Amino acid sequence: MAQDGIGAAMKRKEDLRFLTGKGTYVDDINRPGQAWAAFVRSPHAHARIVAVRTEAARKAPGVVAVLTGADLAADKVGILPAGWLIHSKDGSPMVEPGHPALVADKVRHVGDQVAVVVAETRDQAREAAGLVEVEYQELAAAVTVTQAVAPGAPLVHDQAKANTCYDWHLGDKAATDAAFAKAAKVVTLDLVNNRLIPNAMEPRAAIGEFDRATGDLTLWTTSQNPHLIRLLLAAFTLGVPEHKLRVVAPDVGGGFGSKIFHYAEDFTVLWAARKIGRPVKWTNTRSEAFQSDAHGRDHVTHVELALDKDGKFLGLRERTLANMGAYLSQFAPSVPTYLHSTLLAGCYTTPAIYAEVRAVFTNTVPVDAYRGAGRPEASYLLERIVDVAAREMGIDRVEIRRRNFIQPSQFPYQTPVALQYDSGDYGATLDEALKRSDWAGFEKRRAEARGRGKLRGIGISTYVEACGIAPSAVVGALGGRVGLWESAHVRVHPTGTVTLFTGTHSHGQSHETTFAQLIAEKLGIPFDNVEVVHGDTAKSAFAMGTYGSRSLAVGGSAIVQAVDKIVAKGRKIAAHLLEAGEGDVEFRDGKFTVKGTDRSKSFGEVALTAYIPHNYPAGLEPGLEEGAVYDPKNFTFPAGCHVCEVEVDPDTGTVQVVGFTAVDDVGIVINPMIVEGQVHGGVTQGIGQALLEEALYDDTSGQLLSGSFLGYNMPRAADVPSFRVGTKVTACTHNPLGVKGVGEVGAIGSPPAVINAVCDAIGVRHLDMPATPERVWRALRTARKA
Amino acid sequence: MQNFGFQKPRDLAAAVAAAKKAPEGKYLGGGQSLLPVMKLGLAAPSELIALSGLAELKGVRVEGKELVIGAGTTHAEVAASAEVKKAIPALADLAGHIGDPQVRNRGTLGGSLAHDDPSADYPAAVLALGATVVTDRRRIAADAFFQGMFQTALAPDEVITAVRFPLPEKAAYAKFPHPASKFALVGVFVARGAGGVRVAVTGAGPSVHRSAPLEKALAARFAPEALAGVAVPAGGLQNDPFGSAEYRAHLVAVMARRAVAACG
């Protein structure tokens, strides 16, 4: 291992820039002659638009233009498409209502875009937006999924009967029914996976620019995948030639999935810029972000587990209502289906599984992928019902998991729900987590806490997830409308330094560091000699971007392939210079050496020769630059064990997380410090989901009650303990790096561990997330009465 | 936020004169309550008249059996004041737990009382200690000062100059923070002094108020055990998704018990 290569805890290249306030985010960019946009958003959850009167706004100081849904309809543009098609049980395609960037007929959630005002300054735009008079005829709203599927519920879209987008299933129903028929014990559980608001630190922002002279369009936007946004704008929403459109996502300050999607505002600023012939800039306010960034989770689930008398799992059934919100965000249809129910085997050998998922429209902000996207919902229901089963059968919580684990010898393991796991050692991560958390010594700590008047509990979760998305052909077969490969271009400069152009894009994952380490290792050059370029369609080749913990597993694999091509070409050049056969030259530690001799050429000498080819192999092209595309052969399957310890104040119901251990198998680790940081962030979000965060809607008016940080409880430093984080490695078998992915494991593994700990502390069977003080206090009171 | 005028008068008389001329104007203390409300468009005063820096509103001193704190004293100054820590340590402790460091370095005692947020901490101390609110024109007893949610006895152009706190025998404040906002979901200030036992509750109701059942129980015996079995009625308390009235009523009793225990 090089000192700065694979496995080294290098400090981040990004840190000097970010920690000294020198990053460049979209809002830091200003274009000559730019105007500002502000949106008029619906104050109602569901209302018919009777009239939009723009005269007062048009006359307001500084106003350049006011555009409405009618203008959009007249231009026949701006319908945001869904990127995944799910078919219902009966074979019919999902209901796809289309999502207009500005609505003309009726508003369907609080925050829905009705009009945009473009003015000279940000303040003028916002002031004038307040002068646009929209006359609404209010309609009854369907706010929760349960309301939305009730007979006679108001229809969010007329074409979606019973507000149903699709009614999908997966697995073998007959085999599962048979498993339940022979079960010694059936455990059932009803649970809610609470709706979350991502709250990236950087609010979304966009600048659209149109050059009348060349016809070039440029969009700067806060995106995890600028190429996808360009494709959607070109092919669907704006209908412009793709080669005349450039999409730039500079530094991006967090996203967690919420910046994957093609949002109405991206389209609108570009459309407006073309109409008025000036750059148009927009930056979301925090208040608007709560009502316009795609939310996450929001499942209402019934789950049943069948067991034999020894606690072996025989079958699992899931029935879920998944909230899509008011419109289909791009990847929303895939989240509660192929990113969710396919994970229901978990780490276990459950032979029969059947899942039914009904996706439902409601008068709420659209819901889409959010850190973990479907897998946290799967790990939560699974790890909760396993704990309930252990409790009801009198089997130890750890033991019941061990009895059902897929064993290392069983890989590759075909689950009954489509996935084939390539590698893992669930017993090893469990053992390590038990050791690190001092699971065996817990009862002593519980007794000590009791002496202080606190109820202490411990909880465990053993999870597996599927990421590194994904083989394009598989994605296509499952309804995906995209390929999910990744590109890399490695440009070696004449002096031997390297620029990498990647299609992935960091929004906090430290790609500039990790990818530089990877290239430093593979080419034997210093880490500082590698620069990573991403986030600009004019620089990197088309690729799919960053989400689903795919950047290293898929993007990194493309880099390896490109580097291999560089080495292969370098070997030809070196062999020529060394007057040796190509097969006799080996490349190691940055040197091409004739095997068994001390005759060698450094990587730098070879690079220089490639650009100054005076003494050069005949027929070989000068230059040293290679591109590669990697389409993964399978998903990757990180897994692990999380152990949470909590203390509950029985007087107030307050839960304090006093210990958290995460032992994850994320495959080969490039930078352990970055991996640890990703786990810290993910676990913090998981603790947030389990104890603090909840998007609360008034179920009559559809108003978002937790529409600011006064009501939406984001985790703070004091809400989390000092984490104990470790890794246990089994290499991925099907990608060249053996890596699996770490971006989402923290948020996937932790929520059930936290709730299992709370239930253990207060001695109840189940408690819905978030376990707020009042909810815990009520559960304790009910338990005492019982 | 709407446009507004800004004045920085050189003394109290000039401030009051400016306020009389600006009926849509507002005094500005540390700006920790009024400015956020203005940013959200919930208040749009024509004029802000800054009181910060007015010498008449400064100072912390003990006069006889009273601790006198100038209305322009920041929370951080109260929290760090040796005089306050000696005279009424519970008050210094309360001030040290308001908001966050930024709020404590800007926010003032007078500003907090004039705004009278139903979840603010200071009103509980003022009411429980039976303090007197001193203004540019009169003295107002705490029991008469707080008149409901965001409602005080102050005239629109009246300025709080100081608060006079009688020195208690015992006093303590216990707060249960709102999980998200960290304002008091329930805060209880208990005090025993010349005026007997007084218990003031903030956060739980539409405004700061005294709790008769808790005062009665503690008057009989000033000890945490005296509160066992005392029921705080939930009627009239705030009831929202962040805390039902029933839960808040329960927390009032718990916080009262903790405050009494903290009195030692």
Image: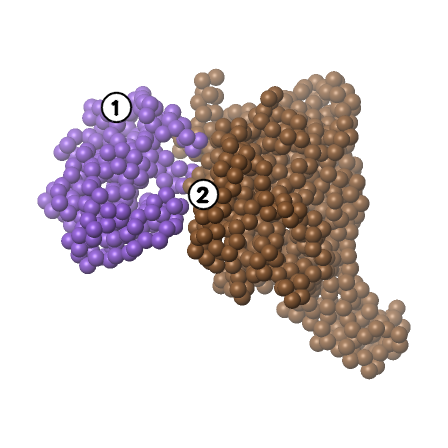
Instruction: Kindly tell me whether residue A767 is visible in this rendering.
Output: no
Toward the viewer: A694 or A452? A694
Q: Is residue A638 above or below residue A28?
A: above
Identify the residue at image location x=54%, y=46%: A115
Check disc 1 and report the residue beneath it. B213
- Dot 1 falls on a residue whose secondary structure is helix
- Dot 2 falls on a residue whose secondary structure is loop
Identify the residue at image location x=64%, y=30%: A158
Label 2 chain ID = A
Toward the viewer: A69 or A42? A69
Cα separation, mark 2 vs mark 1, equals: 35 Å
* Left or right of A52 in this view: A726: right
Q: Is residue B156 above or below residue A529?
A: above
Q: Residue furthest bottom?
A: A614
Label 1 chain ID = B
In what quadrant of the picture does the N terminus of chain A appear? Answer: bottom right
Chain that appears brown = A
* Left or right of B76 in this view: A753: right
- The numbered mark at residue A709 is 2
Identify the residue at image location x=30%, y=30%: B257
Rendered colour, chain B: purple
Identify the residue at image location x=75%, y=40%: A479
